[in-house]
Amino acid sequence: MIRIIWKGFIAVSIIFLAAACASVEEPVYPPEVISAETGVTDLSFSEVTLEKRLVLFNPNAVPVELTSCDSSLIIGGSSFLREEYRPPVQLAPKETLELTIPFILSYKDLYKISDSLKEKHASGYSIDTRFRYIQPAGEDGIEETFSAAAEGVVPLIKKPLYHFQRLYVNSLGMMGADITVWMYALNNNDFDITLKDFQGWLIVNNENWSGLALKKPVVLKPGEISESIFRFRLEFLSMGKTVRDLLSGEPELFYDFAGESLLETSVEFLEEETLGLALKGEIELDKPDTTTKGAHSSVKIENSIEENLLHIFGRYSP
């Protein structure tokens, strides 16, 4: 009798144990990071695009849902960018999944976080990505995390700096003036930049003076200042007396230049780019000391021109 009851107890215990085991879900293990790498995929004088590529493996016999992930980019010792990706991603059981996460970095913003980056041509960086996934527990489950890090090197590109340094009056007459303008361009990069095209409109002291354009390409050497020369003619009758007065009495002029430049390099992803220009500054004015015959000083010439212009414009003024 005792033996029968014992057997029955064993049988019932086995049934209850099996039922209990069936009610407990197997744990879901975090996906494994098979590979994590990053690199540059696009480049301009304004921004750089980085791409982090990940391969994840689901070691579980059930799908794993990645609810979200966030990435932190550290460069120059500072946390620069934090991106969050929310749409859920499902990893199939015993399968791998490739993920690509892009990052667009503005050089203007990048140089704000560290002055030292302005002096460098490249910098190391790291991107740490933290994933969240659901671990079943009871009815709702709990959220757990795993992470994947990658490192790389980003080029630090600088736009060429342009400045109109000097303006020379080659010849000054009653009807107009022949002008030469010197423009300096500084290349703060460690590679050559070919200035294939440069054009726009020069405005001096709020007067439209002339369109400027380069006739041939100019090579901007690394760390050097290159010089470009523009020549044009100002016609006083079409531009007004104000321009004539500027050339006669001002030691320096204020300019605005609106245009664009076409740049060419041998750097990958940066082979050719057109940049818009909006330049402002002061420009020194050099005047001729004599006429072409060398008979009179520029002061006498200018006084004579002023009298003639006043007479001409006086006849046509309303």
Image (cartoon, rainbow, N blue to C red):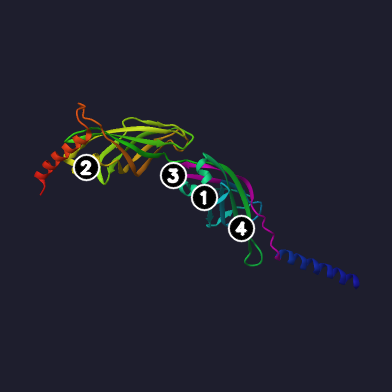
Q: What residue type is labelled 1?
A: Ile
List the residue tagged with mark 4.
133
Task: Name the residue located 61 percent from the left edge and 48 percent from the top edge.
Answer: 149
Q: Position of residue 41 (x, y in %)?
A: 49, 42
Of label 3 and label 4, which has the lower sequence position? 3
Q: Where is residue 256 in the image (x, y as percent from the top left)?
A: 31, 44
Which is more foreground, mark 1 or mark 2? Answer: 2
Element carrying mark 1: helix
Element carrying mark 4: strand
Q: Which residue lies furthest to the bottom in this view?
A: 1
Q: How far apart are marks 1 and 2 (CA)?
A: 47 Å
Q: Which amino acid does label 2 sit on?
A: Asp
Please identify the quarter of the rendering in which residue 135 is found: bottom right
Marking on residue 113: 1
Task: Name the residue located 60 percent from the left edge and 57 percent from the top edge.
Answer: 132
Q: Is residue 229 magenta?
A: no
Q: What residue type is labelled 3?
A: Ser
Asked whether disc 1 touches disc 4, contact meaning CB atoms under 8 Å apart, the reply is: no
Q: Give the range drawn in magenta.
A: 23-52
The majority secondary structure of the magenta stretch comes to: strand
Q: What residue type is labelled 4?
A: Tyr
Residue 295 or residue 88, whichever sits in front: 295
List the residue tagged with mark 3.
46
Please give left or right for residue 184 compared with residue 85 in the image: left
